[in-house]
Image (cartoon, rainbow, N blue to C red):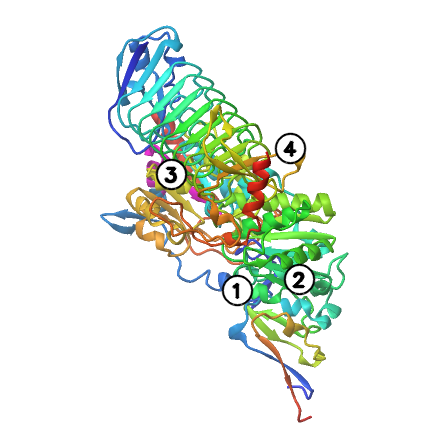
C-alpha cells in the first residue's frame, strides 16, 4: 500500500475545508500536483503545501492509497468527504465532517473528532479512537436521510443526536452518549452504546434498533416500557452477539405501527431504576448526569417481564 | 401644538400593533395612545440617549469622524477580513437585510440573524417536520382553544392577547374571550397563567415528556406512569379530553420550548402532536412561534428569499451554504473563527456568551446602533442610524409572517442616515475595493 | 367622580398597558366596533377607558355599569371596582 503523509504545519483559527484530502482525488497525481491542490480557508483559498508538508509515494489506484495526516488537525474540516476507497489515518484530532457522505474505504482518527462524523455515509468504516461530538452518523440540517450503511466505531464518548435520521448501517459507541440517540431513525440501522445514554433514546424513531449496555435515562415517557415488555438474552445485533440480559422495549409509542417498530434494548442489571419504586442509585463519577427523578412512576413489573422473556 | 399621528406601527415586539397613536410636538414625541407600556417606552425614549454619530476607535478612544471616513474604514475592515460575520438584522427593516445579504455575498462572509439564539430551533424543526401555520387574523376569527406553551405574552408581547388572540371578537368567535379556552403550559405561575382557564404547571424542562404523553394518549396507548412531568396521569387524560372538545386550536410557543434541553426536538414533537390532533380528532390545529424583535421573522424571510436559507448562511465559497452548528454566529464566535464583525439591529452585549463576547472584543467590530449600548465599549466603528419605524420607513414582518409597512413619525436628528443608506454606502466601497484588488 | 354605586379605580404603576380591559369591556365593544375587533378605541368619547402613554386611563366613567369584566381580565390588579355605599 502506498502512503502519502501530510504533516500539518501550523494551526490557524479559521477552519480549512479540505474535502480534496481523499484517496480518490489524490490517485493518479504526482506529489507536485497534490501539493498544489486547493483548500478553502474562510473566503480565501490556499494551496495544500501552504498548510501541510507533503511526502510519500503517490500511486494511480485510489484503493491502494493510504493518506496519513501526521499530527493534530483540529481545524481541518471535511477530510475524507465522499471517499469511495483507500484509507485515511489521522494521528491526532480532526474537525467536523470527517468521512461525510463516504461510500467506502476506511478512516481512522487516533484523537477526537468534532461534529458530524460520517454524516450521511453510505459505506465504509470510520474508527474514532477518542471521543466524537454531536451528530455521529447524522444529517445536515434539513435533510431527511442520515447514515445509510457502513460502520462507525467510537472508542470514547459521543455527543448528542447519535444516528439522527439513520436509515441503515451500524454505529458502535464504547462510551456514553448524550441525548436523543437514534432520534428519527427510519430504517434498519443499529446503534450499540457501551456506556450510558442520556435522555430521549429513540424518540420519534420509526424503525431500527438501539442497544444500551449501561443506564437509560428516562426523560421521555414514550419509551414503551411494558409495551413489548420482555427480557431478551444475548441478542444478536450488528453482526455480533451481545452478551447479557436486556429489556426489549418499544422506542416510540407515538409512531404508527405500520412504519415498523423501533426497539430499545436496555441492560437488565443497570436499569433497575426503571422499575416501580426504583430510585436511581447515587451517581458515580463518569456516570450519566441525573438531574430529575422522574423514574419511579413506571408501572412495569419486573417479575412479569422475566416470565415473558423466559417463555420465549 | 401637539399633533396626533394615527395608525402608527409599533416597532418593538413581534406583534407589530398597527393602531398606535403617537403625539408629536415640535418633532418631539410627547406621548402615545393604544400602545402598551413597552411600545410607549420605545417611542418615548427613542430620542434620548442616542449614540453620537460616526465614530472610529483611535488609540483606544472612540473619536467622532465624518461619515465618509467611517464608511471607508468599515469597508476596509470587511474587505480585509477572511471570515466576516454580519449579525443582527432583527431591529431593522427588510430592505436593509436585502442590502445586507448583498454585502455578505460581496465580502463572502456569514450572515446570521438573532433567531440563531432564540427561535432557530423552531425553524429547524419546521424543516424536519413541516408546520401547519396560520395568520393572527385567522386566530382571531376562528380559534377557540389557545395554548400558550413556554411563553409569557403578558410580559413579552403585552397586546398579543387583547389585540390578536384571546379578547377580540371574531367572525366565528362572537363573544371574544368567552368563546375561547386558554391553556397555559408553564412551570411558573406567570401573569398569562393567571388569565388562563387551565394552567398546567409542569416541572421544568419536561415539556418534551408531556407532549409525548399527549401523543401516546392520541395513539390509544394508556399512560403507564402515575405522574408525568409533575402532572398526575388522570389530569393529563382530562386535559387531552378537554382539548378534544374544541374546533380550532392554536399553539403559541416561546423560549420555554425552544431554548431548553432538546431545543428543536421539543418543537419537533409539538408539530407531531399538532399533526396527530388534526388527523385523529379533527381539531384544526396550527402553531406559531412567539417572535421577539419586531422584524426577526422578517430577517428570516428576507435572508431566505435572498439566499435560500433562513439564517446562518455562509458565503465563504461564493455560494450560500447553511449548517447550524457550523455556520451559525454563536458557533463561529465560540470557535474564534470570525475575524471581523458587523452588528446591526441587535445587542449581542446582553445575549451572547462570555466566550463569544471576549472573542468579539479581539476583532474589529462595526456597530450600527442608534443608542448607547454595552457593545459600544468594544466597537471599532460606530454608526448611529435613524430608527426604523420612528425616524424612517421600512418593511417589517409580524410574527405570523405578514409584512407591514413601518411609518415615519419624526425627523431623524442631523447626520443620522437610515440603515439601508449606511449599508449601501459600505457595499459600494467594498465593491470598489474588491474591484481594485482584482 | 360620578355619583354611582360602582367606581373604577386604576393603579397605573401596576399596569402593563396590555389593553385586555379595554377590549374585554362590553360597553367599549358595543360603542366602538374597532375595540370589538381588538384595536385601540377610535371614538374616545364613547369608550370607558383607553391605554394612554402605556398605562390605563379612565375616560368616561359615566358609561360604566360596574359589570366587572375588566377586573377579571387584569392579571395584576391594575384596575378595580370601588363600591360607593354612601349614595
Mark 4 neighbour density, 10 Å: few (under 14) some (14–19) many (20 or more): few
Quarter in which the C terminus of chain B is drawn: top left
Mark seen at residue B40: 1
Residue that numbered label 4 is attached to = A259
Q: CA distance from mark 1 to mark 2?
A: 16 Å
Where's residue C84, x and y in %? 65, 89
> Residue shown at 58%/56% (left/top)?
B226
Reading the chain from its start, which is encountered first: label 1 or label 3?
Answer: 1
Same chain letter for marks 2 and 4: no
Same chain letter for marks 3 and 2: no
Question: Nearer the viewer's eye, disc 3 or disc 2?
Answer: 3
Q: Is residue C85 above or below residue B422?
A: below
Give residue B17's quadrant in the image: bottom right
Question: Which element carries disc 3, helix, strand or loop?
Answer: helix
Q: CA distance from mark 2 to mark 4?
A: 48 Å
Same chain letter for marks 4 and 1: no
Q: CA distance from mark 1 to mark 3?
A: 37 Å
Number of numbered discs on residues: 4
Chain under disc 2: C
Residue that numbered label 3 is attached to = B332
Mark seen at residue C39: 2
Amino acid at each position: 500500500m502506498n502512503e502519502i503523509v501530510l504533516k500539518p504545519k501550523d494551526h490557524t483559527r479559521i477552519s480549512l475545508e479540505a474535502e480534496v484530502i481523499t484517496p480518490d482525488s489524490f490517485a493518479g497525481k504526482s506529489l507536485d500536483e497534490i501539493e498544489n491542490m486547493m483548500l478553502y480557508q474562510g473566503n480565501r483559498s490556499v494551496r495544500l503545501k501552504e498548510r501541510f508538508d507533503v511526502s510519500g509515494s503517490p500511486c494511480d489506484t485510489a484503493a491502494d492509497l493510504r493518506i496519513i495526516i501526521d499530527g493534530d488537525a483540529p481545524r481541518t474540516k471535511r477530510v475524507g468527504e465522499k471517499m469511495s476507497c483507500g484509507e485515511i489515518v489521522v494521528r491526532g484530532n480532526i474537525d467536523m465532517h470527517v468521512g461525510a457522505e463516504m461510500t467506502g474505504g476506511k478512516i481512522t482518527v487516533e484523537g477526537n473528532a468534532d461534529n458530524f462524523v460520517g454524516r450521511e455515509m453510505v459505506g465504509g468504516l470510520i474508527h474514532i479512537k477518542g471521543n466524537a461530538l454531536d451528530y455521529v452518523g447524522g444529517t445536515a440540517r434539513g435533510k431527511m436521510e442520515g447514515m445509510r450503511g457502513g460502520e462507525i466505531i467510537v472508542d470514547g464518548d459521543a455527543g448528542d443526536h447519535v444516528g439522527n435520521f439513520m436509515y441503515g448501517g451500524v454505529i458502535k459507541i464504547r462510551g456514553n452518549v448524550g441525548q436523543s440517540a437514534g432520534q428519527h431513525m427510519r430504517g434498519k440501522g443499529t446503534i450499540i452504546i457501551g456506556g450510558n445514554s442520556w435522555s430521549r433514546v429513540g424518540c420519534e424513531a420509526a424503525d431500527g434498533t438501539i442497544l444500551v449496555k449501561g443506564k437509560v435515562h428516562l426523560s421521555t415517557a414514550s419509551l414503551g416500557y411494558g409495551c413489548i415488555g420482555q427480557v431478551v438474552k444475548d441478542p444478536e445485533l450488528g453482526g455480533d452477539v451481545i452478551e447479557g440480559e436486556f429489556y426489549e422495549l418499544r422506542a416510540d409509542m407515538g409512531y404508527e405501527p405500520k412504519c415498523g417498530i423501533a426497539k430499545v434494548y436496555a441492560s437488565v442489571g443497570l436499569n433497575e431504576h426503571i422499575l416501580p419504586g426504583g430510585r436511581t442509585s447515587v451517581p458515580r463519577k463518569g456516570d450519566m448526569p441525573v438531574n430529575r427523578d422522574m423514574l419511579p412512576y413506571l408501572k412495569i413489573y419486573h417479575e412479569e417481564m422475566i416470565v415473558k422473556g423466559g417463555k420465549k | 401644538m401637539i399633533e396626533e399621528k394615527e395608525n402608527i406601527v409599533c416597532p418593538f415586539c413581534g406583534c407589530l400593533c398597527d393602531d398606535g397613536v403617537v403625539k408629536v410636538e415640535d418633532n418631539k414625541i410627547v406621548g402615545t395612545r393604544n400602545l402598551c407600556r413597552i411600545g410607549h417606552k420605545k417611542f418615548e425614549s427613542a430620542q434620548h440617549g442616542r449614540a453620537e454619530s460616526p465614530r472610529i476607535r483611535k488609540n483606544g478612544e472612540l473619536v467622532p469622524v465624518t461619515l465618509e471616513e467611517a464608511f471607508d474604514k468599515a469597508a476596509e475592515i470587511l474587505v480585509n477580513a477572511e471570515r466576516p460575520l454580519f449579525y443582527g438584522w432583527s431591529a431593522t427593516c427588510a430592505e436593509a437585510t436585502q442590502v445586507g445579504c448583498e454585502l455578505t455575498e460581496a465580502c463572502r462572509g456569514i450572515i446570521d440573524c438573532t433567531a440563531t439564539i432564540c427561535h432557530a430551533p423552531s425553524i429547524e424543526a419546521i424543516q424536519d417536520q413541516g408546520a401547519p401555520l396560520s395568520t393572527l387574523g385567522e386566530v382571531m376569527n376562528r380559534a377557540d382553544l389557545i395554548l400558550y406553551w413556554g411563553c409569557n405574552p403578558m410580559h413579552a408581547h403585552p397586546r398579543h392577547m387583547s389585540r390578536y388572540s384571546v379578547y377580540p371578537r371574531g367572525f366565528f368567535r362572537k363573544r371574544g374571550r368567552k368563546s375561547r379556552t386558554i391553556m397555559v403550559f408553564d412551570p411558573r405561575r406567570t401573569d398569562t397563567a393567571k388569565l388562563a382557564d387551565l394552567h398546567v404547571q409542569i416541572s421544568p424542562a419536561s415539556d418534551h415528556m408531556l407532549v409525548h404523553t399527549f401523543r401516546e394518549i392520541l395513539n390509544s396507548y394508556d399512560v403507564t406512569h402515575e405522574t408525568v412531568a409533575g402532572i398526575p396521569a388522570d389530569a393529563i387524560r382530562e386535559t387531552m379530553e378537554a382539548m378534544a372538545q374544541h374546533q380550532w386550536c392554536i399553539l403559541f410557543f416561546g423560549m420555554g420550548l425552544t431554548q431548553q434541553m432538546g431545543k428543536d426536538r421539543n418543537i419537533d414533537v409539538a408539530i407531531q402532536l399538532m399533526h396527530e390532533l388534526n388527523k385523529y380528532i379533527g381539531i384544526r390545529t396550527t402553531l406559531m412561534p412567539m417572535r421577539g424583535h419586531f422584524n426577526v421573522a422578517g430577517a428570516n424571510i428576507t435572508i431566505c428569499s435572498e439566499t435560500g436559507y433562513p439564517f446562518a448562511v455562509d458565503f465563504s465559497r461564493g455560494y450560500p451554504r447553511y449548517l447550524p452548528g457550523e455556520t451559525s454566529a454563536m458557533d463561529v464566535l465560540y470557535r474564534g473563527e470570525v475575524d471581523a464583525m458587523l452588528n446591526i439591529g441587535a445587542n449581542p452585549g446582553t445575549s451572547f456568551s462570555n466566550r463569544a463576547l471576549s472573542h468579539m472584543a479581539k476583532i474589529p467590530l462595526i456597530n450600527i446602533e442608534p443608542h448607547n449600548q454595552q457593545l459600544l465599549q468594544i466597537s471599532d466603528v460606530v454608526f448611529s442610524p435613524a430608527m426604523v419605524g420612528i425616524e424612517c420607513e421600512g418593511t417589517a414582518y409580524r410574527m405570523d409572517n405578514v409584512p407591514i409597512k413601518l411609518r415615519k413619525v419624526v425627523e431623524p436628528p442631523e447626520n443620522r442616515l437610515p440603515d439601508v443608506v449606511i449599508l449601501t454606502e459600505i457595499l459600494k466601497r467594498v465593491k470598489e475595493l474588491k474591484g481594485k484588488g482584482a | 367622580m360620578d355619583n354611582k354605586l360602582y367606581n373604577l379605580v386604576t393603579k397605573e404603576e401596576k399596569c402593563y398597558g396590555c389593553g385586555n380591559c379595554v377590549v374585554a369591556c362590553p360597553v367599549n365593544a358595543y360603542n366602538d366596533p374597532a375595540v370589538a375587533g381588538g384595536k385601540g378605541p377610535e371614538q374616545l368619547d364613547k369608550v370607558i377607558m383607553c391605554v394612554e402613554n402605556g398605562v390605563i386611563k379612565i375616560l368616561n366613567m359615566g358609561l360604566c355599569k360596574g359589570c366587572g369584566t375588566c377586573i377579571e381580565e387584569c392579571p395584576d390588579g391594575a384596575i378595580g371596582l370601588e363600591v360607593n355605599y354612601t349614595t
